[in-house]
Image: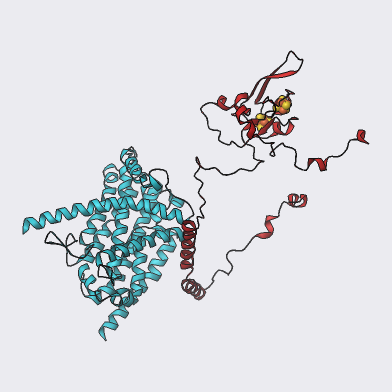
Chain colours: A cyan, B red
Amino acid sequence: METSIIIETIVKAIIVLAVFSALAGFTTYIERKILAFMQRRLGPMNVGPHGVLQLIADGTKLFCKEDFIPANAVKPIFKIAPIITAATAFIAMTAVPFFPEFEMFGYTVRPIIADVNVGVLFVMGVAGIGLYGPLLAGMSSANKWSLLGGARTAIQLLSYEVVSGLSILAPLMMVGSLSLIDINNYQAGGISDWLIWSQPLAFVLFVMAGFAETNRTPFDLLEHEAEIVAGYATEYSGMRWGMFFIGEYANLFTVCFLISLMFLGGFNDFYFIPGGLAIVLKVMFLIFFFLWTRASWPHIRPDQLMWLCWKILMPLAVINILITGFVMMF
Amino acid sequence: MSLQDLKERNVGTQEYMLVQEDDYPKTGWEEFKQVMKRSIKGELFGGLKITLKIMKEALFNNNMHTVQYPTEKLPISPRYRAVHKLLALLESGENRCIGCGLCEKICISKCIRMDTRIDENSRKEVLEYSINLGRCIFCGYCAEVCPELAIVHGGRYENASEQRAHFGLKEDFLTPLDELKNQQEYDGFGAISPNADERMKKTPLAY
Ligand code: SF4
Ligand code: SF4
C-alpha cells in the first residue's frame, strides 16, 4: 500500500506540474486572443494557423534569451525569487481536488495530491508565501521601479490576504470543515445548495481578493507598466521572467478552482453535465471573466487599493462573519 | 470644407465636454453618499457589457480594425505623397519628362538629379534621372511644378530597402512598358483638378 501511494503521488505531482505549466503557456495565448477580440483586433495570426504555434515561438524565445543579472543586484536572492513564485503556485495545488474520483483500470484515482483536512488553510497559506517571490525580486533588483513594485507587492498581497482569509471564514463556518472535498460535498444537492446563494457577499469579496492575489488587471499594481515600467519584473529576462508568469497563471488556475469549489458547487454533477466537465466549465468561465475584466476595467491607484481593502472590504467581511455567526446561533 | 472653415482655427474648442459632471464631495457624508451611489449604479458591469458587445461585433460581424499588413494594405488617399513615379506617354511608352529641369531646381532638399543632352533631332533628351529618397522630404513640390505631369507621387509608401539606389533611378520610377495599360491619368497631388476646364479663365488673346 505504501509504495503504491508514493508512486501514485509522484505520478499525480508530475501530471499536475506538466498540465498546469502547459496550461499556463496556453492561457497566455488565449488571453492574447480574447483581449484582441475585445479590442477589435485579431491577435497573434502569423505563426501557425491563427497563431497557435506562437506558444512554441514564445517558449523558445524565453528559453534562449540571455539570462541577465544586473551588476548591483543581490545575486542569490535575485536568482531564487522567480522560483519561489512558481514553486509556491504549484505547491498550493497539492490540496486542490481538481475532479471527482474516477475509476481507471479498476483502480480508484482521486485527483488530489494530498487530501489534507486543512485544505483551504494550506492553499491560502502557501499562496500567501508566494508574496515573497515578487517582494524579494523587487528588493534585490537594484532598480527603483523594481523596488516600488516590491513595495506595492507588500501592500497589495498582504492586505488582500486578510480579506480573502476573512471572507471565506463565513462559508467555512457553515460547512464546518477546512477540507476542500468536504466543502465540495456540502454543495452536492444541486444548484440551490451552492454556497454563492447563502454567502453572496463572501463570494464577491473572495473574487476581489482573488484578483488582487493573482495580481490580475484592476489590481496589478506590482507590475503596472504605465507607472513603474514592469515593477518587480523589470530586470528579469528569459526563463526567470517566464517563471513569474507560469507562477502567475498557475495561481490564476488555483484561484479559479478555489472559487468554483467553494462557491459554485465544485465538481458535483450539474443536471446532465458530469462533475468533471462541470468544474472545467466553471473554471473556464472564471478565467474568461478574469480576462474580460482585464479588457474592461481601469487600473486603480495604490491608495485607492488600500482604501478599498481596509475601509470597505475588510469591514464587510467582518460584518458577514458576524451575521453568519448570529444566523447559525439562533 | 469651405475656406471659412479652414481659417477658423479654433473650431475644436466649441465641442469640449466636461467629464466630471458632479462636484467633488466636501464632507465625509457626501463622500459616503458618492461611494454608495457609484457602488449601486453598476458602472463596472456597464463596462463589461460594452466589452462583450464589442467582442461579439468583432467575432461575428467581422468588425475588426486589424489590417494584416504585408498581405493587405490600406487604401491611401490620392493626395498622399508617397514614393515618386514617372509617368509614361501612353502611345510610345516614352517618359513624359521634357527635361525642363524645373523639378531639379525647386527641390528644396536638392535630391533630384538629372542629366540631359540635345539629341540628333535637336530635342532635349533625359539621360539620367535619379531621386535620392534618403534625402527627399516628400514635400511634393516637384510634382506640383512639373508642367507635363511627368513626375507624380505614386501609391507606394514602403521606403524600406537595402540601398537607396534600389528605387531611386529612372527605370524604377518610370512605368514599365507592360504596365502601361494600367497607367491612369494621375488625380493626386500635382494633378490638374477634374473641373479644370470650367475653372479656366480665358487669356486676353482669346477675346
Ligand atoms: S518631394 Fe520635395 S524633396 Fe522630394 S524630390 Fe520632390 S521636391 Fe524634392
Ligand atoms: S519638371 Fe517634369 S518635365 Fe520638367 S524635368 Fe522635372 S519631371 Fe521632367
> In the image shown, does A129 or A243 lie closer to the viewer?
A243
In depth, the one of A41 and B11 nearer the eye is: A41
Q: Residue pushed farthest left?
A: A1
Seen in the picture, residue A210 relative to B130 is either above or below; the reply is below
Locate the C terminus of chain A and report the quarter of the image it occupies: bottom left
Q: Quadrant of ligand 1?
A: top right
Q: Is residue B28 above or below residue A159?
A: below
Q: Is residue B98 left or right of residue A317?
A: right
Q: Residue at x 30, y 59 (%)?
A: A253
Residue B35 placement (x, y as % from top left)? 48, 72
Residue A89 seen in the figure = yes
- Who's the residue at 23% across and 71% down the image? A183
Q: Please indicate whether residue A36 sits to the left or right of residue A96 in the image.
A: right
Q: Residue furthest right?
A: B207
User: Viewed as shown, does residue A61 lie left or right of B154?
Assistant: left
Q: Position of residue B137 (x, y in %)?
A: 63, 33
At horizontal 40% and vertical 70% (from top left) the residue drawn is A311
Looking at the image, can residue B105 be seen? Answer: no
Q: Quadrant of residue A174?
A: bottom left
